[in-house]
Amino acid sequence: MAVSDALLPLDGAEDRPLAEAISFDVPGVPQPQGSTKAFKHKSSGRVIVTSDNARLRPWRDAVCWHARQALAGRGPLAGPIAVVLKFRFARHAGHFGKRGLRGAAPREHVVRPDLDKLARGALDGLGEAGVWRDDAQVVELVVRKSYGEAPGVRIEVGGHTAGQTTAGEGAA
C-alpha cells in the first residue's frame, strides 16, 4: 500500500499527476454489485433490503479495510477525484494445456461479471471507507478487467488535475 504523487493510468491513457494520490491492492475474487431486492417482512411489517450476491458484503468490507489502511488516518479527499480500478481474475483450468496456456484461450476477460457492476461494488467500498465525502466528487473513472496471476483489484485514487484528459478525449 503505497502513497504516490501520481496516478498511474491504464495502458493508452495519458499520465497525469494527481494530488494526494493513494494506491493499493485488494486480494480476493472481485464481486459484482448486482441488484438489490426489497420485501416486507411478514410479521414485523418492516421493509428489508438484500443484495442478490451473498459474497458482495465481504468483498466490499475488504475494499473498505484496505482503503482505510492506505489513507493512514488522513481525512477524505476534497475536490474532484479520479479513480482507476484494475480488476484481475484467475484463468480457468481449461485455458491451460500440457505446454502452458492454450492458443485458443481468450486474451481478455470477456465473461461475467460485468465491468460496471464490479466498479459499483468497489466504489461503494471506497465511499464507506471515507476516501471522499460524496460520490459526486468522482469526475473520472477508468476501469479494466483482465486475467492475472492472483485475483483482486488494484485501486488508484487521487485528486483530478484540471485540464488533463484521458487518451482519445478532447480531440475535436
Image (spheres, grey):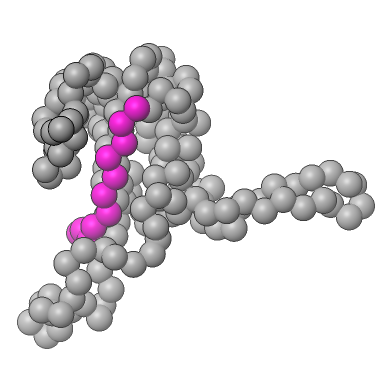
Q: Give the x, y percent position of residue 16.
A: 14, 25
Residue 5 vs residue 68: left or right? Answer: left
Q: Give the x, y percent position of residue 32.
A: 45, 54
Instruction: Name the one closer to the observer, 47 or 168.
Output: 168
Kindly identify the residue that appears in the image at 89 percent across and 46 percent down: 45
Q: Quadrant of the C terminus?
A: top left
- Up-down: is 156 above or below 120? above
Residue 108 vs residue 140: left or right? Answer: left
The residue at the far left in this view is: 99
Residue 38 visible in the displayed image: yes
Q: Give the x, y percent position of residue 44.
A: 90, 47
Kindly identify the residue that appears in the image at 48 percent across and 41 percent down: 61
Residue 114, image quadrant: bottom left
Kindly identify the residue that appears in the image at 46 percent across and 37 percent down: 125
132 in the magenta segment = no
The residue at the far front in this view is: 172
Residue 142 vs residue 123: left or right? Answer: left
- Up-down: is 30 above or below 124? below
In the image, the segment drawn in magenta is: 139-149
Residue 22, image quadrant: top left
Q: What main secondary structure does the magenta stretch of the protein show?
A: strand
The residue at the far bottom in this view is: 98
